[in-house]
Amino acid sequence: MIKFKLAIIACVILCVQNVFSQEKTVTGLVTDASGLPLPGVSVFVQGTTNGASTDFDGKYSISNVNATDQLVFTFIGMTTQTILVGDQTTINVVLLETS
C-alpha cells in the first residue's frame, strides 16, 4: 500500500512540474508612443539567445517561452522594456523615446 501511495505522489509531482514548465509561443505588436509600428525591434528572452525581430508591421513571434521568462524589447533611440511573460500569449508594447 505504501508503494502505491508513493507512486501516486510521484505521478502528481511529475504532472505538476510538466504544467508549470510548458513552453509556449508569444506574439505581439511593438509601436511608438503615437501608435506607429516599429520594424526591427529586438525581442529576446532575458539571459538567453532566444530572440526575434519585429517585421515591417511591428509584429513579432517568439517560441519556446516559459511563464517565468522575461522578454526584453530594445530599439535604438527608445527606452528598453522588460516584461514578465506569465500566462500571456500576446504582449503588445509601446516603446518611448529616450531623452
Image: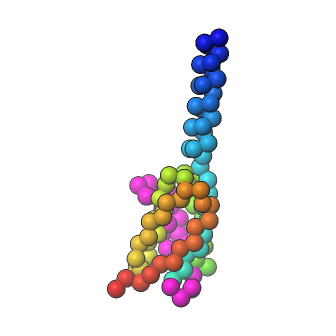
13 is within the stretch colored magenta: no
Taking the image as drawn, is residue 34 in sight? yes
The total of numbered circles placed on residues is: 0
> Does residue 34 sit above or below 12 in this rendering?
below
- Horizontally, is 93 left or right of 89 in the view? left
Residue at 47 percent across and 78 percent down: it is 95
Name the quarter where the N terminus is drawn.
Answer: top right
Residue located at (51% from left, 78% from top): 94
Q: Main secondary structure of the magenta part?
A: loop
Determine which quarter of the picture holds residue 82. Answer: bottom left
Image height check: is 95 above or below 21?
below
Residue 99 at x, y = what percent?
A: 34, 86
Q: Which x, y percent locates residue 56?
A: 59, 79
- Whether residue 99 is situated above or below residue 23 in the rendered picture: below
- Camera-nearest residue between 61 and 95: 95
Give the residue displayed 44% in from the left and 70% down from the top: 81
Give me the residue at 40% from left, 77% from top.
79
Relative to the observer, which residue lies in front, 98 or 87?
87
Q: Position of residue 40 (x, y in %)?
A: 51, 75
Residue 76: image x %, image y %?
40, 78
**Residue sticking out furthest to the left:** 99
What is the magenta range? 33-56
